[in-house]
Amino acid sequence: MKRSVFHWVFGVLMALTSPLYADTTTTATDPLCADAQLWSGKLITDICWSCLFPIRAAGASLGGGNVPSIATDQKFCFCTDPMGIPELGMTMGLWNPARLIEIVRNPWCSPALGGHKFSASNVRLIATTGKADFDASEMSFFNYHYFAFPLTIMLDLFWDGRCNSDGYRDFDLLYVSELDPTWNNDLLAFFTSPETALFANPVAISACVADAAAAATGNPLDALFWCAGAWGHMYPLSGISPTSYGTDPRITSLLATRATAALHRRGLAWKTSGNESLCGGSIYPFIPKSQYRLSMFYPVAETESNHVIGETTFKWGAGRTFPGPGEDHLYLLWRWQDCCVGL
């Protein structure tokens, strides 16, 4: 059984401040590494709780909100129990806060862990340092850290075995880009996603205009998986992107989406929506964009709504960044979960 989230965080912080790591780890808050105050009252006040809705049970919806186009259309379902016997159930679907993604300028910096830097060994540093100040001719680069964050389970708000397809029940660090050589090298990223060559042309890029328009209405086009709406192009799956002046929520949102797409390609992120996911998630090599929504947690939280992948920042991003500590961004990744609840 996994340890509680508080034991996990306590253990991490103790490891960070131990004498063994004193020469490579920051033991106090780094002025260049922001503290998002995740483990505080903000865990309650800075979450969009209305974004949990709608909740669907046997095809009936409770509460307002959008249901993704790829959600199941069934009312009842069958799944096998541990003995292999089919069990009748009803379908359930809801938006779950499932992951936390932090996009940071400085390697190993973790605003989610109180602004501390962990495992800051130059030997192990494969990716490079991110930058925040650019002119329009330069490229931006940020590192990311990908956490399991099953908030409803951690707070005992909702629990059902089949509605937790990946099995995570606590706050866990799943992936760090500093150890991924493909994240800061477009050529290496190409070899993990060779279909990049198919979409590096004006026709494929122009098709993203349709995806941006659809995302503005809350309905991104899953068929255009190489597009991230108004945020830019999904490929290559790396942390390098054309920039604007300073850090922009558009850039960090794009990189958070690319990170999720890269993990889908590697089988580390699953499809949890649709009829085929009722009895458990499934490996899906291309990101199902309509399955996900994002909400910024830091520096300026979205507490009233969240947004779909590719939705223009003119609708949600104004005033959500500021120079200095406000240039590291944390996003809560909401995931639609279809499941079969036994009767």
Image: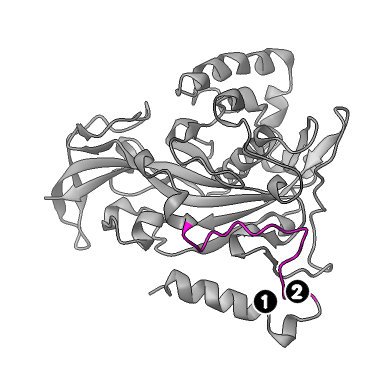
Residue at left offset 51%, top offset 20%: 216
The stretch drawn in magenta includes residue 156: no
Residue position marked by numbered label 2 in the rendering: 25
The reply to whether the C-beta atoms of the residues labelled 1 and 2 are less than 8 Å apart is yes
- Where residue 4 appears, x then y in whole percent? 42, 72
Q: Secondary structure at mark 1?
A: helix
Residue at left offset 81%, top offset 79%: 23
Most foreground residue, 104 or 196:
104
Given the image, on which type of amino acid does mark 2 rest? Answer: Thr
- Where residue 26 appears, x then y in whole percent? 75, 72
Q: Which residues are drawn in magenta? A: 24-41
Q: Is residue 74 above or below residue 157?
A: above
Dividing the picture into quadrants, the one containing residue 20 is: bottom right
Residue at left offset 61%, top offset 14%: 209
Residue at left offset 54%, top offset 59%: 38
Precedes in sequence: disc 1 or disc 2: 1
In this rendering, the count of numbered labels is 2
Q: Is residue 328 above or below residue 174?
A: above
- Where residue 236 appears, x then y in whole percent? 71, 35
Which residue extends farthest bottom? 19
- Where residue 102 appears, x then y in whole percent? 62, 51
The stretch drawn in magenta includes residue 29: yes
**Res. 169 in view:** yes
Label for residue 16? 1
The answer to whether residue 316 is left or right of residue 337 is right
**Res. 149 in view:** no
Most foreground residue, 272 or 320:
320
Q: CA distance from mark 1 to mark 2?
A: 6 Å
Residue neighbourhood size for the residue with mark 1, other residues' Cα within 10 Å, grouped as few (<14), some (14–19), many (≥20): many
